[in-house]
Image: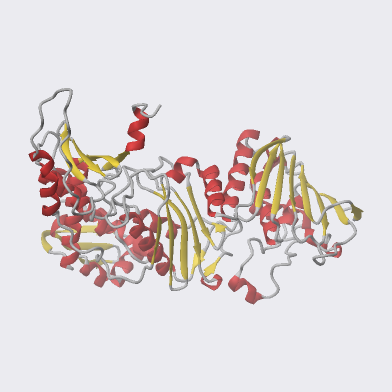
Amino acid sequence: MRIHKLSSQLSNQIAAGEVIERPASVVKELIENSLDAGASEIEIEIERGGEKLICVRDNGCGIHQEDLLLALDRHATSKLLSVDDLAAIQTLGFRGEALASMNSVSRLELQSRQKLTENHNRDSGWRIFSDSMMAVTQEPCAHPVGTSILVRDLFFNTPARKKFLKNERIEFGHIENLVKRVALSQFEVGFRLIHNGRTVLHLPPAATLLEREKRVAIVCGQEFLEHALSIEVEHAGLKIFGWVAQPTFSRSQADTQYFYVNRRCIKDKVVTHAIRQAYEDVLYNQRHPAYVLFFELDPHQVDVNAHPTKHEVRFRESRMVHDFIFKSLHQAIADIRPNVGAGLVPAHPTISPSFVGATGARPPFKQSPSVQPFVAQQNIEQYQILYQTERAPLGPTVQPPPAPPIQAPIPALGYAIAQLKGIYILAENENGLILVDMHAAHERILYEEMKTAWQSSGHLIAQPLLIPVTLRVSEQEAAHVEEHLTFFDSLGLGIERLGPEMLAIKQVPEVLKKADVAQIVHDIIADLATLGESKRLEETINHIMGNMACKSAIKANHRLTLPEMNAILRAMEVVPRSGQCNHGRPTWIQLTLEELDKFFLRGR
């Protein structure tokens, strides 16, 4: 076949394949246009999962009468004027392909009425109708200020694309999830979603914090909000805020993860890696964290023009972004522990505490100061008075012994009163009863002590191998190793290149002498190639220390004295991440007097 130029209709339909994957893609593009037009109310009406009808109405600024026909042309947009605008895109849409792509694979109708000034609007709206590039003459119509776009019979002229659509329930499910995802980033905008004449979702504008939390609960579930921590951190022109779920509220699937960059919902491997790393050694098995996070930075520092669907972005300083997100979330999660100064941060809070702080650059492996278990001797001696008081004989006139005078504030986790079945510590604080899993709590305490001791040493003891481990890699991977030899040396890994595709591992850290060093090196090389850094060695050593802590921690049926139990409670109040053991299980819970009274029907 000779070279020839594609017809405009065919090229438009090919372009539509990049922009419009399914009905949800149409809804996404139309909602983004409405938001860019300054709409405060958006209504989405769907019939038969979007295959029959998609209608998006807004109260935005509207489209000029003379621009209606031009709006259906490819690469026609009001959002870019020059090449310089690409360096700092601040609108959700900007390519000018959405309406042209929809027009080529559906029967499209556009109605709009422009808002001119605060006190004067155009007398009427205008309407155009297009049937797959066959536009009719525009005509006036009755329409409020704003725009309505109706997309009927999607893919009616491209049966090859239509046959890949799923059933009505699945396609509408994608649309509903999309609307919820967009609504989370646009709290000031109201959304209404209608399917087959029935209102499925109504989200009024959310101006206050309570209204925003209500919207988050509708999208992510009330349970997420009850287990979420509010976070807000700003540093060096970067800002992250939103809600992160405690590790005890983890998911089997990554289905409650919403991350927005300058209000654009994205999926990025740098971001995902940073968040996953922040949750290390507090997630149970292969669970996934849950979060709703908003990240803001200078538009010049992020490229949103990396993918036709705009789901992916590129950061100019990806390492800085990664470290900022990791440190912010890592510190917030580490602070989930009993707080002696400000009261108790429960393992399952009903009100989300806030975390606000700066995240300046810190040297690696330098977190909190060394934490050692201790006994608050003065408080324990006062507390033991309760057990030294002689009990009066039981009888009808029994009087309780007078309570000792309170000379010091009661710690967050209170004081131990008993041990249950050799497994749990029972303690009393100002709010009621505390139950502590002594093995899980002691495991976390030992683990944090090991990490602190290792990190404070500042170096790894290396051990030469009697027989070097050979490793086959690609030439590109071998080049990465040669480029980062200093980094490998700092990890205690002595590596030498034997050939174009052959490496020899001659030295390893002593703590890893029984580990699969070859696989660890492979993973480190992959991280360096993808992210420019690697925490694999640290993660492996942490895993080994976690296992050591688990084996060293007190076991069930180990009887503890009251001072020993109180020592564990005091250590939990200062140890980072003491709310979970190394495997992500909760270490303690609070039962308030109100909860106990409700259980025993007191006051009824």
Front-most of residues 340 and 214: 340
Displayed quadrant of residue 553: top left
Note whether residue 55 is visible: yes
Q: Name the residue rendered at 59%, 72% in the picture.
A: 88
Q: Classify residue 225 as left or right of residue 475.
A: right
- Residue 21, given in percent of the width and then of the height, sits at 64, 47
Q: Name the outermost residue toward the front.
A: 397
- Residue 181, given in percent of the width and then of the height, sits at 57, 49
The N terminus, quarter of image: bottom right
Front-most of residues 98 and 110: 110
All told, the count of numbered labels is: 0
In the displayed structure, would residue 414 be above or below residue 294? above
In the displayed structure, would residue 563 be above or below residue 294? above
The C terminus, quarter of image: top left
Displayed quadrant of residue 76: bottom right
Q: Classify residue 146 as left or right of residue 15.
A: right
Q: Name the residue rendered at 18%, 41% in the picture.
A: 438
Front-most of residues 584 and 1: 584
Q: Classify residue 446 as left or right of residue 77.
A: left
Q: Name the residue rendered at 26%, 64% in the picture.
A: 367
Displayed quadrant of residue 137: bottom right
Note whether residue 474 is visible: no
- Residue 532, given in percent of the width and then of the height, sits at 37, 66
Front-most of residues 31 and 68: 31
- Residue 226, given in percent of the width and then of the height, sits at 43, 44
Task: Name the image colouring.
Answer: secondary structure
Q: Classify residue 586 as left or right of residue 271.
A: left
